Every structure is written in structure tokens, then in C-alpha cells.
Amino acid sequence: MTDALFLVLSALAVWSGWRVFRVDSMVRASFQLLVSFIAVGLIAVLLAAPYIGIATVFMMAVEMMVMALFMVMFMMNPAGLNPMSMVHQHRFAAITGGTAFAGLVAAVLLSDLPANPVPPEAEAVRDLGRELLGPSMLIFETAGVTLLATMIGAVVLSARSGRYGESDAGSVPPGLTPGGAPAGRRPAQGGGHHDHHWGH
Amino acid sequence: MIAATLYLLLALPPLVWAAAVFDRIGTGRGALLAGPLRNGAALLLRPVAPTEAPDRLNRLLAPGWYLALALVGLSVVPLAPGLVASDLSTGLVLWGACEALTVVVVFLHGWSPNAPFPLLGAYRYVAIALPAMLLSMFVLIGAALPAQSLSVGAVVEAQREVWNLVRQPLGLPLFMALGLALTLRGPFDYAGGAELAGGTSAEESGPALAAWRLARAAMLVAFSAMAATAFLGGYLGPVLPGPLWLLLKTLAVMAATVAAGRFFARMPPARMLTLLWVVLLPLSFANLALVGIEVLP
């Protein structure tokens, strides 16, 4: 039963991972990746690691949702339903993908896995946590707070509504020819708006 | 485990009906008790309206996912000591995963018809629901701290002396913000609303709409059972048997959630976002800090 479930979930993870690169929309690609991660999370549950498995599902659901939202936002594909290719840099991607796959397979085949089962009373998660974070908790926390401050800073800097007025006030799109008139639509002259200084 | 699943499946249809009745009280939308059933039956007979180039699979499945997430979320709620459908050591995390996936499902429901109003509703909802979900995570960690366990059963047992509602009074009101977001109602109903002609459901009709409304009511039941368990002591109570206490508390939270959805006005999304990040999220941190100080030995 567990073996059958493992095989089905692995097949689902691989298939949806492959579909990420074959679908034609960023929203679809994000959620195919989410399906792949959910399958991996459920495999972790089968491996008697329920916290890591369910937390994977939880984190990935949030992350893929945010990713879909931001990709659609930055790629100017308003709905995410317009078809577009999900692959680029073919040769570079093929080489790095192949290298990573070969490295991981080599790691699985060549590493000497321990054969003695962990005694049930061993606190595996606690030991792992101490091993990973014991001496470096301060570094970890500092990095976390720094990253958070960076994210907030990036949002504040890129937001349109700022402390000193709207960030795009007075900005002019580049011209179509060098030194030419700015591209795009021009607002009606004297329409009560403050940006009628085009072409200066 | 099987017994608990059966009880839940038996209790769910009447509770879903009760949720629909609560939603009708005072709205003047026809018969109170038979109205939801009549409405549902009428919807089942109507045709499904097509849209241009939709994502058919997700459009078809979104109501089903929503209902499934409500059921999975409900399954971690213990009905009596030891009587729980999914007896996990990390039940609260599973509930959190259901919350997160609900945001994804509501987004897909609005995205898949490929129509403007549902899409606007979907994006708007995600922007508001993600921080609301973050809020609930801190609140639930607060509920888990006195139990020193992520198991929902342990959270209930830790409330034998005093309910979490008394120990951490901010918890339930903050958690109800999430409930309003999960069940798409009142001040957190950014997925729908009259100004978007129904939002994510604007293009839905017939059985698909009936299924979506059913799932939304089931999510209200699941959320209320979870809130009653995490903050109101779940099945704990004198005289009456445990499952009956849980039922009464669930109904009370359901009524309170519906009432909160009616009482509070909805703000523009930008202001709601500010409220969430600047007021409610720091409040949840304060709640967590208070609980931490309380449980310090």
C-alpha cells in the first residue's frame, strides 16, 4: 500500500514537474509546480516525517501563490492566461539541468547510507535542529532580519506612493529614436495635470 | 478514526444547512428554513453559462477543491477524547495547509473563467487573504504554546483548567478575521461583492454556483469547529457529552462569524491591507508575546 502510494506520488511529482515547462501560462506553471511540491510533501508524510511533509505543502501553497501573482505583475501579462513560452536559454538550461541531475544521482548512488534504523525513542527532530542551528542561531536570526529589512526596503523604494510624492511624477518614457520625442500617449495639454513638460 | 469520520460526515449536511439559514436571517430573502434547500435545487436545474477560452479543468474542480479543503480541515478537530478523524501529531499545521490552499483555490476559481470581474476578485482576494492567513498562523501558534504540541487534541486537553479565550483574549477575534477571509464574507469578502457583480462567482451559474456556495458553507462549519476547539475548549464542558458541547460551540462561533460579517463594513483593499499589516499583525505578535510570558516556567 505504502509502496503503491509512493510510486503514484513520485510519478505525479515528476509529471507535474515536467508540465511546468510545457504549459503556456505563468499561473499554470506555478500551480503545476505546486502540485509537484504537494506530491513531494505527501511522500515525506509517508516517510514518517509529518511535520516536514505538511509544512512543505503549507509553505509551497503560499509561495507559489505569491510567485504567480508577482510573475504576472512583473511580466505585464495582465491575466496570466495569455499564452507565452515558459522556457528560455535552452543550452545553458540543458547543461545545468543535466549536471545537477548527474550530481544528485551520483550522490544517491555513491554515498554510504546508514543501514541501522533509528531507535524509536531517539529525538531525531530535536537532534537535527541542534545540529543545524545550535552554534549558528545568531547568524541565522541576523540573516533573517536583514532579509526582511531588504524586502521592506525594496517595496518602499519601488512603491508608487512615497513619502515625497508619487514616484513617477515628472518621469518621461524614452524616445523611439535617439533624442526623439518620448514614446507613448501624451496627456491633453493644460488638463490640470502637472506633467505637461514633454520633450524637454 | 473511521467512527469519527462517519460522525463528521453525518453532522456536516445539517450544519451546512444551518450555516445557510444563519446567512439568511434578517435578509428577507424568502423562506428561512426551506429557502436554502429550495434555492440549491433551483440552481441545480439551471444551465452552466460558458465563457470564452476558460481553463476548463480548474473551473470545474475549484468548488470541489474548496469543499475538500473544508473536509480535510474539519478532520483534525477531535470530537471527544481520542475520537478524531485524522489523528496527527501536527494537526494544526494541516489546518494551516488547508488555509493556504484555500487562497489558491479561490484564486483559481476567479482566474479560470477567463473573464474580467472574476479575475479582479481573485487578485484582490489574494492580496488580502495572504496577510490574513499569516495572522492566523501566529494566533494558532499562541493556542499551541500552552499545550507545547501541534496536535489539536493536546491543544484541547491544555484547556481543561481555563479556555484559551480567557488566557489569550486577542486570539479568537484575530482568528475570526481569518474565518471571514476563508469563508468569503463581510469585511473580508474581496473575492466577491456587488461592485464586481459577484467577483470570482460572477460568471458562475447552475450546479457550479450551487457547489461553490455549498463549499463556502462547509468551510464556515470547518472554521467554526476549529475556532471552538482552539479557543473555546472544544469538547470540554460539564454535564453534557463532549460531542454535544463541540456542536453547541461550533454553532455559536458560526453565528458570531456571520454576525461579524454583517456588522463590519468592508474597506477599500488598500486600507484593509494597511489595517492588516500595521494594526492586526502587530496585535497578533503582542498576543504571541503575552502567551509566551504566561507559559514561561
Image (cartoon, coloured by chain):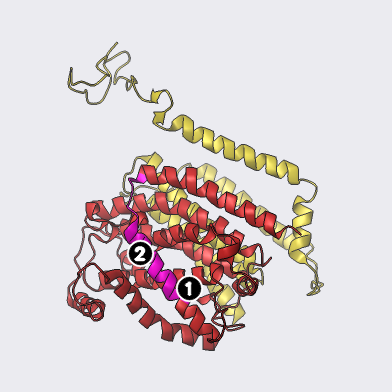
Chain colours: A yellow, B red
Identity, as a three-letter code, of the amino acid under mark 2: Ala
A142 is higher (above) or lower (below) than B44: above
Q: Which residue is mark 2?
A: B259
* Residue A47: quarter of image: bottom right
Asked if both marks, 1 and 2, belong to the same chain, the answer given is: yes
For the record, the magenta segment spans B249-269
Decide whether residue B260 is among the magenta residues: yes
Instruction: For mark 2, name the chain.
Output: B
Comes first in the chain, label 1 or label 2: 1
Q: Is residue B205 magenta?
A: no
Q: Is residue B22 left or right of residue B202?
A: right
Is residue B93 visible in the rendered image? The answer is no
Q: Residue at x 62, y 64 (%)?
A: B144
Q: Position of residue A18 (x, y in %)?
A: 48, 59
Say which element carries label 2.
helix
Rendered-image quadrant of the N terminus of chain A: bottom right
**Image coordinates for residue A116, horizontal then vertical, percent:** 82, 72
Q: Residue at x 55, y 52 (%)?
A: B284
Q: Which disc number belongs to residue B225?
A: 1
The amino acid marked with disc number 1 is: Ala
Q: Residue furthest top?
A: A200
Give the position of the C terminus of chain A as an image quadrant: top left
User: Looking at the picture, does residue B198 appear above or below residue B21?
Assistant: above
